[in-house]
Image (cartoon, rainbow, N blue to C red):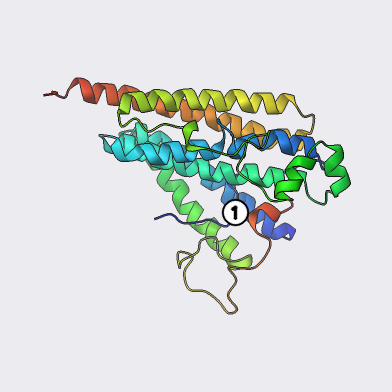
């Protein structure tokens, strides 16, 4: 993967990590309004980062969850996650 | 339903080819305290949880464990990339290669296959949550052993990330146990 693609991937990974962490925290603290508000702010930024990555590199999620597919079908393009050199 | 995301949860880097480390790390792929055990344990236990919170925590942590399972396989894949049969033999991995070639088989570092006896699904929420908390500590200890076995800082970075996740999961399971105990104290049994 080229450098611009890796930079976009890094952004997706950073935001998703924050959201995973907040999600687990909210599971056991469902009434924490500050955490919920941070979750929602990051969730909006995450959607934007995913859109930018998918535009440049290809779909992140299969089964139609990454929206309409372009021609040719890009899901099967390499590298797969374990093959990426950071 | 599960969805697959075509990316790792956290970047996995290795500084150099290291077949012996690949063998040691394999235990987190298919050993007793590994990520496969964790995922199957939590995702099996959730069906007998009495509250939405407990079901949610087990679903979310179980799903994250599958992402960690993929990170471990990536470490093994990268540490063994380009290895020749002669190098494999010298690293004392000839017996693994004879059976599985370069395939990543869910087994511990000694080649013992993964079995579901590593986990339990008691159906009793309090017993299950205690097992989960212990499992996170055992996995944390395993990651510390693995970090001690290598001086590859790139590899250590990924192992340290996984170690930290065990600590966070332990914390969330502890809160879930408190919540379940409160729920069960308030409930009448007949």
Number of marks in the image? 1
Q: Which residue is mark 1?
A: B7
Secondary structure type for disc 1: loop
Q: Position of residue B33 (x, y in %)?
A: 55, 30
Q: Quadrant of the N terminus of chain B?
A: bottom left
Query: Residue pushed farthest bottom?
Result: A71
Q: Residue at x 11, y 24 (%)?
A: B190
Residue B175 x, y percent position in the rendering: 37, 25
Q: Is residue B117 above or below residue A73?
A: above
**Residue A67 sits above or below residue B178 on the image:** below
Residue occupying image coordinates x 62% and y 44%:
B71
Left/right placement of residue A9 relative to residue A32 reads right
Q: Where is residue A6, by image quadrant?
A: bottom right
Which residue is more in the foreground, B17 or A46? B17
- How many neighbours does mark 1 have within 10 angstroms: few (below 14), some (14-19), or many (20 or more)? many
Q: Looking at the picture, tell me which residue is in the foreground, A49 or B49.
A: B49
Q: Which chain's residue wears label 1?
A: B
Q: Position of residue B3 (x, y in %)?
A: 46, 56
Q: Is residue B179 left or right of residue A3?
A: left
Q: Determine the residue positioned at 64% across, 41% down.
A: B72
The answer to whether residue B12 is seen in the rendering is no
Q: Residue A1, can we see it?
A: yes
Residue visible at 51% across and 61% down in the picture: A61
Residue B81 picture location, percent across and down: 78, 50
Left or right of residue B47: residue B138 = right
Instruction: Specify whether A70 is left or right of B63.
Output: right
Q: Nearer the viewer, residue B19 or A56?
A: B19
Residue A50: image quadrant is: bottom right
């Amino acid at each position: 993967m080229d450098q611009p693609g890796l930079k976009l991937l890094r952004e997706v990974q950073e935001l998703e990590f924050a959201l995973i962490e907040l999600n687990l925290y909210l599971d056991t603290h469902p009434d924490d309004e500050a955490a919920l508000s941070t979750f929602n702010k990051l969730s909006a930024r995450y959607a934007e980062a995913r859109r930018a990555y998918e535009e440049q590199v290809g779909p992140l999620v299969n089964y139609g969850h990454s929206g309409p597919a372009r021609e040719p079908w890009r899901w099967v393009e390499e590298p797969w996650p374990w093959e990426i050199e950071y | 339903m599960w969805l697959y995301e075509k990316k790792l949860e956290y970047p996995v880097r290795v500084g150099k080819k290291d077949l012996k480390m690949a063998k040691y790390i394999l235990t987190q792929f298919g050993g007793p305290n590994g990520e496969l055990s964790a995922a199957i344990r939590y995702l099996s236990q959730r069906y007998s949880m009495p509250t939405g919170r407990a079901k949610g925590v087990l679903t979310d942590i179980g799903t994250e464990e599958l992402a960690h399972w993929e990170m471990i396989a990536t470490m093994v894949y990268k540490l063994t990339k380009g290895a020749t049969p002669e190098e494999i033999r010298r690293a004392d991995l000839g017996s693994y290669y004879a059976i599985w070639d370069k395939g990543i088989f869910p087994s511990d570092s000694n080649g013992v296959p993964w079995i579901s006896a590593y986990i339990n699904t008691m159906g009793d929420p309090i017993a299950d949550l205690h097992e989960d908390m212990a499992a996170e500590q055992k996995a944390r200890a395993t990651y510390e052993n693995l970090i001690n076995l290598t001086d590859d800082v790139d590899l250590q970075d990924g192992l340290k990330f996984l170690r930290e996740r065990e600590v966070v999961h332990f914390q969330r399971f502890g809160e879930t146990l408190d919540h379940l105990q409160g729920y069960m104290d308030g409930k009448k049994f007949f």
